[in-house]
Every structure is written in C-alpha cells, then in structure tokens.
C-alpha cells in the first residue's frame, strides 16, 4: 500500500491497522481474579489448609491469566498495561491487609463494652467490673482542643511567612530546617521536654492538663506548617498579581485571596494533624499521668485521656483482669471512631470551602 499526494512522489505507508482493536470485556479483571481464587482454593486449601499460600498462588495465577488473555486478544502493549494495573491492585490489597486486620481486631475485642455505661461513667470508686471512660473522653477532647488552639495559629503564621514573606532568606532556611527536625523527633522527647521545663518552674511532681496540651502542640506544629506551606504554594501567582494590580496591600491579599483560596487544604491538613496527635500515649504518660475521676480544669490536677486510659487498663487491669482488658479494647475502638470522625469532618470542610469553578 502506498500513499500519494498531488505533485509529489509516492510515499510508502507506515501502517495498515484497523481503528477499532479487539478488547476484553469490562468484567474480565474481576472474572480473572474470581477464577484464580477458585482454582487456587480448590487445589491448595484441601491439601495445605494455608490461606496465605492460597492468596499468593491466586495472585500469581491472576497475573498469568490476565497477561495471556490480554496478549492474545489485545496485543502486547495492552497486555503490559493490564499487568501493571493488576500488580498495583495486588499491592493495594496487600497494604490493606494489616489495616483491615487491626480494625477488625479492635472491633471484635472492643464491642463487648461499647454500652451506655462506658460513655456515662468514670472509674471513680470502680475496682473490678463496670465503670467507663467518660473522664478519659473529656480529657482527650480538652487536651487536643487546647493543643489545636496553640499550634494552628503558630503553624499557620509560620507557613505564611515562609511562602509569602521569607522567600529564600536565611531566617526562612533556618525555620525550614527546624521544622524538618521537629517532624522527625520521637513523641516521647516532646513530653520529656515539657515535663523538664515545668519541673524547673514548679517542681518534678507536677502533672496537669496544660502540660500534655503543650507536648501535643509541639508535635502538631510541624505538620500544620508543612501542610499549610504546600497548600499556599498551590495558589496561582496570577491571583496575587491581580490583587496587587488593583492596589490591594500584601497583607490583605494574603488574608482575602491566598488563605481563602487554600482554606480547604489548610483545614484538611489541620484535621490530619489533630488525628496524628489524638492517639499519642508516650508524651501524655509523663505529662498528664492518670486519674480515675473527671477533671475539666487543665490548669489544676491530673487528667485522663483515652490512649493513657487504654494503656493502664491493659497493663494494670485489676481484678478481674478481663474487665480491665475489655475497657482497654473499647477505649481503643472509641479512639479510632474519633479519628475517623475527624477525617469525615475534614472532607466536609474541604468540600464546603473549596473554590467553586462553575457558575
């Protein structure tokens, strides 16, 4: 086959292929996976009884079926694409195994005490069975809220300086370096630093709620700075230049244009920072201690939190031991529910405050 044009010599054709190439049906990936699971289960489960071996063989068989069928039907290029897609899907499934296992274990062990008494009673004058985690729930809310109030303004203003004002100054580089260092410090170091500071001022025996809040704020600040900094960098410079062209001062441009445009991303980053510290145990062990009653005053007396309550309920369950262990699992389950609720709130905030592109 040749291709000709008026007034020019003949050119050889480079290809002769149909426009519509044969493809596998849309249900093929799931059908291939189901076939692989059935074959692997029928061969291995009766003989070995190993679920792990069955899953591995099923994954390999799924890759073979996908590669062969796609290569015969669609060609080598599409077969490679399907193989990579299958590998990514299998990797995602492997990554989900420990997460699902942890969540299922916590739900299975914590559902026994998920009753009204657990949310309405504390451990005051409770030694064995009964009691609840009302004091720990309130302590977690109060301490985390104070830590958020401390860390969010500091982290937000730091990120604004780094992106909008600092540029490549020496101070900005030093702040960036310190933020990187704070991101990697162990959580127990933050707790020990706060405990040592308050011990120098008030004595080594002091344990109050504000100490735990400051320790959590130290852990939250780097996350807030990093997430806010990345969100501010995503704001197009055209928006800033348009505001400057209209004579708007820089501070007003930052407040009304930059921050408002990136508000959804900032809110998501703050929520993730809160979820990151809500389950911290080590810094609270050395700053808050534990109490069996409800304390709403973070400036006086010890406070209980869900992570510390779960830790002591599991390591020092009392008599009978089963009651304390059940309380520990239920406290862990409630903590997971709180973190999931925070993530849902972050999604709602992101959707509500995200910039509207349509009319």
Image: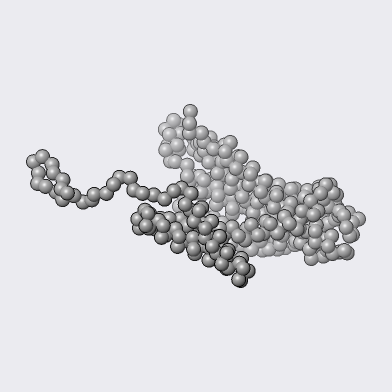
Which quadrant holds residue 20? top left
Is 280 left or right of 43, judged from the image as shown? right
Q: How many marks?
A: 0
Measured from the top left, where is residue 182 in percent x and y? 59, 59
Observer-nearest of 214 and 59: 59
Task: Determine if residue 295 is in view.
Answer: no
Measured from the top left, where is residue 152 in percent x and y? 63, 47
Measured from the top left, where is residue 135 in percent x and y? 81, 51
Kindly identify the residue that appears in the image at 45 percent across and 62 percent down: 64
Kindly identify the residue that appears in the image at 45 percent across and 31 percent down: 247
Kindly identify the residue that appears in the image at 41 percent across and 60 percent down: 68
Q: Quick check: 260 above or below 28?
A: above
Is 347 left or right of 194, judged from the image as shown? left
Is 285 left or right of 73, judged from the image as shown? right
Measured from the top left, where is residue 124 in percent x and y? 88, 54
Name the residue furthest right: 125
């Amino acid at each position: 086959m040749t291709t000709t044009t008026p007034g020019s010599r003949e050119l050889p054709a480079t290809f002769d292929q149909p426009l519509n190439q044969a493809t596998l049906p849309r249900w093929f990936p799931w059908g291939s996976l189901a076939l692989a699971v059935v074959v692997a289960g029928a061969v291995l489960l009766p003989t070995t009884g190993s679920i792990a071996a069955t899953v591995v063989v099923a994954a390999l068989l799924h890759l073979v079926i996908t590669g062969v069928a796609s290569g015969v039907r669609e060609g080598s290029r599409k077969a490679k694409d399907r193989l990579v897609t299958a590998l990514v899907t299998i990797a995602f499934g492997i990554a989900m195994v420990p997460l699902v296992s942890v969540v299922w274990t916590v739900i299975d062990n914590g559902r026994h005490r998920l009753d009204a008494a657990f949310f309405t009673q504390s451990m005051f004058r409770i030694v064995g069975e009964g009691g609840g985690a009302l004091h720990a729930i309130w302590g977690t809310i109060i301490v985390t809220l104070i830590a958020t109030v401390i860390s969010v303004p500091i982290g937000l203003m730091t990120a604004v300086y780094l992106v909008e004002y600092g540029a490549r100054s020496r101070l900005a580089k030093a702040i960036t370096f310190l933020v990187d260092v704070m991101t990697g410090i162990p959580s127990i170091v933050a707790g020990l630093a706060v405990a040592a500071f308050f011990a120098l001022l008030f004595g080594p025996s002091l344990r109050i709620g504000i100490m735990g809040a400051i320790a959590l704020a130290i852990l939250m600040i780097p996350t807030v700075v990093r997430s806010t900094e990345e969100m501010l960098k995503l704001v197009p410079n055209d928006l800033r230049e348009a505001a400057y062209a209209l004579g708007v001062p820089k501070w007003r441009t930052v407040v009304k244009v930059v921050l408002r445009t990136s508000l959804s991303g900032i809110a998501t980053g703050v929520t993730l920072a809160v979820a990151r510290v809500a389950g911290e145990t080590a810094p609270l062990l050395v700053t808050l201690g534990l109490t069996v009653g409800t304390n709403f005053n973070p400036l006086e007396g010890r406070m209980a939190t869900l992570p510390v309550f779960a830790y002591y309920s599991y390591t020092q369950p009392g008599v009978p031991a089963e009651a304390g262990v059940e309380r520990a699992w239920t406290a862990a389950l409630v903590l997971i529910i709180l973190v999931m609720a925070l993530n849902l709130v972050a999604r709602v905030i992101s959707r509500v405050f995200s910039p509207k592109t349509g009319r």
